[in-house]
Amino acid sequence: MSVVEIKNLSFVYSKKTPYETRALDDVSLTIEEGEFVGIVGATGSGKSTLIQHLNGLIRIQDKKRSSITINGMSLSDKKYLKKVRFDVGMVFQYPEYQLFEDTVAKDIAFGPKNMKLSKEEVDERVKRAMEVVGLDYATFAERSPFDLSGGEKRRAAIAGVIAMQPQVLILDEPVAGLDPVGREEILTLVQKLRREVSKTVLMVSHNMDDIARLATRIIVLKDGRVVADGTPKEVFISGKIEETGLELPLAARIAKNLKARGFDIGDAITPDELVAGVRRAMEAKHV
Amino acid sequence: MDGRGVLCYNPLMPIIEVKNVSYSYPLRDGVRLKAIKNLSLSIEEGEYVALVGMNGSGKSTLAKLLNGLFEPASGDILIDGINTKDEKQIFEIRKRVGMVFQNPDNQTVATIIEDDVAFGPENIGVAREEIVERVDEALRLVNMSEYRARTASKLSGGQKQRVAIAGVLAMRPKIIIFDESTSMLDPIGRKEVMQVAKTLNESGITVINITHNMEETAEATRVIALRHGRLALDGTPKEVFASSILEDCGLKLPPARQIATELKAFGLDAEDVIDEKGLEEGICRLLK
């Protein structure tokens, strides 16, 4: 059984008004446990609409035609809605804007409390979540979330989601607005979360370098449709990315330009692959 | 290449002078957060500056001090010779220093694009014929003339930011500050906005780009890094990337330079590489 199963999902905003916009157009896909899916597409391609469907924040418009199941639970069925929201954790863009409690620990406890867990279990989850995101409990638990630094706030916000121990973690541009060192910390954290908390991760990002390095699979959206779906290598080498108005990762752009100039170093989509390709070409030159 | 002062029209007076400026925000119960500490720097007309540093280092505070949204607690800021503390001159400051913010959806006031661009000059009482002229010119400079009669809500992120830039241009500013204006855009939108910034700089406008993106940083002629409200680094991209305190400022080398560093063992001159083009040329030289 697939963790996520989407069938014929369409969605129209402002239906029957002059502003009617088709955000999703007959999207079908399945996601298996353990995948790290990068979701890419230009602004307005339907990425946010798609992910907001996955935990029921946007309800399915045409229940006759479209369906979404999470671990076999149909989202058309209201009785599963709450359960699905605990199983699918959503980290929104700039999640620190959603911090609201007067202490970090209370803020992180909000989700687990809603799950009606015992007080001990809630406390345990808060401690564990803070430990995973690297916020020392003794130092941060009783502090106001609003006194934290930018990177700390974001980690606190992520802790609030993973305290629910979701099976599927969805992150919408998790490093937007962070300084380069903070970015790297959060991306390292995302990999750690995949190992330790949520096996299946979906990440929306405009940064193709990050996607090339982290994702096991890429889904490309354009005008509400899936136009490419495969491993990073398949998708980036297929030429589909340029057609959607996005750009290739840096390593792939350079490899492509080198090839055009008569230096074939093979396919490369990550810095490591580019370096390896150059090494091979250098060695071949000396043979 | 050090681009500082190359386009300077009046070598006697920098367009921006920051002299021993401090500024703090009230937190609670009389506690204040010192955001800018005794900062001094000057920027010449026509420079293209990347203003960088970790979250909370004081970049946006400095931007707001530069166009008079905040007043220094101590020290002075002169814009084109005018002190930002002089309340009677505040509109002169605002006219000279335009700002483009982060979120493309928060910067439009009118439904129709040309009305939105006209908002600034209308507010300062510019004559109708001149407003039309300014709006035409501004939309042309950002390459959005054909959209003038359309509604802003239907545009892409990059297009919305270009309209926001046009709104700033209609005020005929001498300085434009981009405060993380590309951080919410897709790669194409980012390129569009950076291209416009470059064109405007070439026409003589002083550009300050506040950014976390190290590729954008490499495009500037001068990089100023703040750390804890103080000046930490100031130099050409090449000089700043060579600094040992780069990571202490929350910064990393641009991706192309990181790859170049990996290729150093093969004889690539990594210190010369600041961007993608440089890396490609460096690899070509290796493989020839």
Image: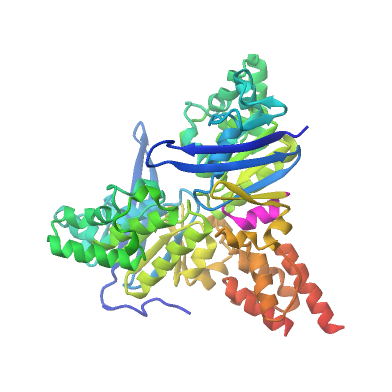
* Residue B123 spot, x, y in % from top left: 17, 53
Name the main secondary structure of what is drawn in magenta: helix
On the rendered structure, is A262 left or right of B67?
Answer: right
Residue at 33% across, 72% down: B44
On the rendered structure, is B129 left or right of A102?
Answer: left
* Residue A5 spot, x, y in % from top left: 69, 35
Q: Quadrant of residue A54?
A: top right
Look at the image and say whether residue B288 sits in the magenta stretch: no
Look at the image and say whether residue A214 sits in the magenta stretch: yes
Determine whether A67 is above or below B261 in the image. Answer: above
The one of A238 and A206 positioned closer to us in this rendering: A238
| Total numbered labels | 0
Residue at 71% across, 74% down: B264
On the rendered structure, is A143 left or right of B171?
Answer: right
On the rendered structure, is B221 left or right of A112?
Answer: left
Determine whether A21 is above or below A61 in the image. Answer: below
Residue at 63% across, 61% down: A249
Q: Magenta residues, as a range?
A: A206-216
* Residue B4 spot, x, y in % from top left: 39, 76
Judge whether residue B17 can be spotted in this image. no
Q: Quadrant of residue A51?
A: top right
Residue at 40% across, 66% down: B197
Judge whether residue A75 can be spotted in this image. yes
Task: Give the residue at the far right of this rendering.
Answer: A287
The one of A124 and A252 positioned closer to us in this rendering: A252
Instruction: Specify the quadrant that holds the C terminus of chain B.
Output: bottom right
* Residue A67 spot, x, y in % from top left: 64, 31
Determine whether B120 is above or below A13 in the image. Answer: below
